[in-house]
Amino acid sequence: MEINIEEIYSLYVNDVYNYLYSLCKDKNKAEDLMQDTFYKAHVSLMSRDIQDIKPWLFKVAYYTYIDSIRKEKREVIKDDIDIVNYKTPEDITVDNSSYQTLLNLLDRLLPNEKHAILLCDIQDCTYEQASVILDLKINTLKSHLYRGRNKMREFIKKEKKNNG
């Protein structure tokens, strides 16, 4: 079955964007990473046939994100620049949403636990798909998922206790 990049884009653009946003928490960066992801997917699809598109696309997105983190660590800012942060109504809405709270709680987890929850619980990937994306054995993924979910339950209980 041959599927072109436009179809893949229309099917998965929102899922990939949400996944990348949940990793970087920056709208503009998530959009840039999403574009890079689909560019890499397009180039790769020209030379080979991918059977299970969604997990493969999430793996491309994941490694695109990791590459961007590595690149940022290599960059050195030479000047001190005062940055003014103006929030748009859209940004304020996102900041106040429960999704943002969830992302903040997820940041308290170990990286593998966070990625397992993002892929399995938020992006609805199967265990098999998530294990391929993260390059983990399925039992290792399940272990990270189990520990991450338990920690999240504790974080949520503490959050409710502090706010309630």
Image (cartoon, grey):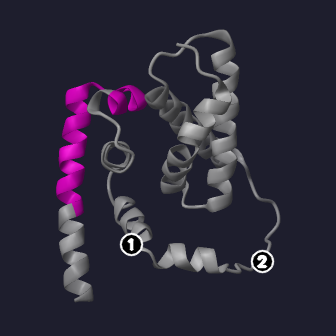
**Residue extent of the magenta highlight:** 129-152
Residue 138 part of the magenta-drawn span: yes
Q: Quadrant of residue 106?
A: bottom left
Direction bottom: furthest residue: 164
Cα–Cα span, label 1 and label 2: 30 Å
Above-or-below relation of 53 to 107: above
**Residue 82, labelled with which disc?**
2
Q: Position of residue 23 (x, y in %)?
A: 49, 52
**Residue 98, labelled with which disc?**
1
Pick the front one: 36 or 144: 36
**Residue 65, labelled with which disc?**
none
Measuring 44% from the left and 30% from the top, which residue is drawn there?
A: 55
Above-or-below relation of 22 to 65: below
Measuring 66% from the left and 10% from the top, which residue is drawn there?
A: 47
Other residues around mark 1 within 10 Å, as few (<14) / some (14–19) / many (≥20) = few
Q: Amino acid at mark 1?
A: Ser
Measuring 61% from the left and 31% from the top, which residue is drawn there?
A: 7
Residue 34 part of the magenta-drawn span: no
Q: Position of residue 147 (x, y in %)?
A: 19, 49
Q: Quadrant of residue 140?
A: top left
Direction right: furthest residue: 79
Q: Position of residue 85 (x, y in %)?
A: 70, 78
Mark in the foreground, 1 or 2: 1
Q: Amino acid at mark 2?
A: Asp
Q: Is residue 116 visible?
A: yes
Q: Quadrant of residue 154?
A: bottom left
